[in-house]
Amino acid sequence: MRKLILLLTFFIAALAAAPAGAYTYDVCRNPIKWPSNLVIWNVSSTSFGGTPWEASLNTARNAWNDAPGNNFNIGYYWTTDVSTNTSDGKNSILMPSNWSDGGALAVTYTRRPFCFFFSTGSHWQEADMLFNPNKTWDTSTNPPAPVDAPFNSTIVATHEHGHGLGLLHENDTFALMNEYYPGGGVVGTAYQVQPHADDVAGARNLYKPSTPYTVRDVAATPYRHSTSDGRASEPIPAPSAFYRGQTISFQFTVENRGNITENVPVYFYASATRQVTTSSRLLGTAQLSIPAGVSATPTLSVPIPTNGPWDYQYLGWIIDPLNSIPEIDEGNNGATLIRRTNFIWNYLPTACFTASATSGSTPFTVQVNASCSSDQDGSPLTYTWDFGDGNIATGVTASNTYWIAGTYDILLTVHDGQSAAYEWRRIHVSCNNTFCPEEPY
Amino acid sequence: MSKSRLLLCVSLLFSALTVSAATIKPVDLAELVDGADLIFVGTVIGMESVPVRDGSFAYTYVTFDVEQTLKGIPRSGKTITLRFAGGQAGDSVYEVSGTPRFADRGRHLLFVEGNDQLTVPLVGRQQGKLDIVPHPHTQEPIVVDDALRAVDGVKENGWRRGGLRLNRDGTLRASREGVRVISQEGVHIELEPETAGDAREKAAPLGSVLGELRSYIAKRKASSPQFRGKQFTESASKNDVPASLRFEHGRVK
């Protein structure tokens, strides 16, 4: 009987734990949260005090405190009075000397009361946030592109504080609460660590002000969903090089962190520095409609404008560049890709050649002619022929004799002094019964 | 049954087991397979919450009826008990981040490591647990990950994921309203492609996913120096769980 009650207990317990929404989970039929809108954490001055961790943790805390429309405040009390004991009445943040949470970067332990059948809600009583002492940490507050060790403490602490508010993991959208490091990545030109659109929507959902309100904030970020498995985010890769006359193609992420749909312009730029501004070189413009709490990573294609030369540039974009939307945070509207793109101010030459024949029997001689190759810059071209049988030739025309039957690729390389173009043709050489040597002469 | 005991039982009915909340590094399938002491398909047949000796924390012992073992000691037809941090102790519920959820009769594919040592004895925490659930339309068993996205098989060193996604209540997830391009000048913007309606409903059958996983495990065994053949550790006695199991459990010096 006891066993039956226990089984039934956990069966229903698991059902009761199932979240009703995307952001939070219900206990006693209501989202669990702190009883007040201010929670104080005891932060270990032994683990973090006087080190770069201090600024990192403060940045993480403020990221939530300053999130648009968030009605919740996280307070810090720096002290040696911290503990991993989740029953001592203190919310502790520390780096314990021992770690039994495997490969997790950080873990939050929480305590709450039992949910009695007549309860209509539950609340956190205590939480402890622990950072893994076995990992290498980067404590910078504006990390450009953290993807692996050293792990950025500001991003991880902001994520854990999201749990401290009562938020669950969010795998479906571009979010800092994505369980896989680095979550939604960083935001804006200054590479701020901020909760993303979905995250702040969750926080507002939990700790909503008593009166209706409108929050407006659009943002740009150089992160995208991981294309490998669709779960975690990763920095958007920058194209390595473009030649004059080509079309640039890159992805960009924009999000609406507010609670109303925004019809907003996005301007695209090339910038010599990581700080994209409206004075940077304008590539093109678009007007997008972004629903509240939504992030997206479209792909942009734009021909390189003719006002070169350009050299190495950051590709960037600014959402709401003319400040037409009164935003809670105006500092997160611009982003650039993490790495620079080389704009080579030279047209690629065009490689082209004709062959006198593409099949024959041994000994098979082929004449090639590359006079149809060209270069838009008018630079003198050099020609290199690789006949695939070990023979190399130069010049606009050449010829080669194949003595052994087989299939060969003729590769032409045309060089204009700065860059090269390639063209190839396949040659089939069959065996002539009267003349078919096993080895070349 | 005493009044207080009855009250405790009733109160348990409305309590939660665990919730996830850790930040973790994604692990690929090679790490899942190589790092696991045991990989098995099983069904939850029991869960028991056990407080530590001083009552300041609790562990939950989840017992599985093992259907098939893909790596580790073959224990087909037997039961395995795993220990997860978190549970009820006294009048408190302790929850630990990154701990996956289990429900009675839940069917799972599990990649086990460090049972009785780690707070979550799964490779990559919740990444080491996949759920086997009925397809909402066909009722055929399918495999979904912790994001409730269908796993269709193995691709290189990762899962091959399909377009099917579920809501937490097991129904098909509808696509969300997205960004629209109103106008553009000098640029061409291509929005992320939506998964087609029929792809959103398709998922590979369980047998095919397990078949591909078996082949992958065999390949890793033959080729990977990291492939661990470590012995699976059964959970120790639940009767006397020391407080020291979790960290030093006390003040940090």
Image (cartoon, helix red, strand yellow):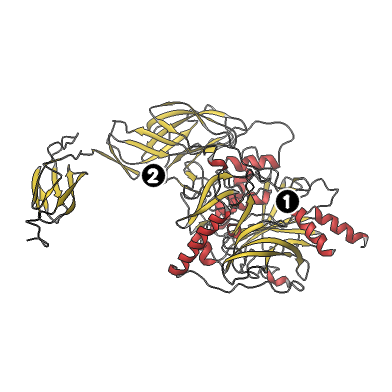
Secondary structure found at label 1: helix
Would you say A66 lies left or right of B237 here? left
Q: What chain does mark 1 sit on? A: A
* Residue A407 in the image: above or below residue A416: below
Q: Amino acid at mark 1?
A: Ala
Q: Position of residue A28 (x, y in %)?
A: 79, 48
Q: Residue A81 or B198: which is nearer the viewer?
A: B198
- In x, y percent, where is residue A39? 71, 50
Provide the residue designation for mark 1: A17
Q: Badge 1 local density, few (<14 within 10 Å), some, or many (20+)?
A: many
Indicate which disc residue A238 carries. Answer: 2
Mark number for residue B135?
Answer: none
Mark 2 surroundings within 10 Å by alpha-carbon count, few (fewer than 14), some (14 through 19), many (20 or more): some
Q: Secondary structure at mark 2?
A: loop
Query: Vertical placement of A241 versus A91: above or below?
Result: above
Q: Chain of mark 2?
A: A
The image position of residue A121, as x and y in percent, is 79, 46
Q: Do dots 2 and 1 share one subunit? A: yes
Gap between marks 2 and 1 measured at Cα: 42 Å
Where the C terminus of chain B falls, by quadrant? bottom right
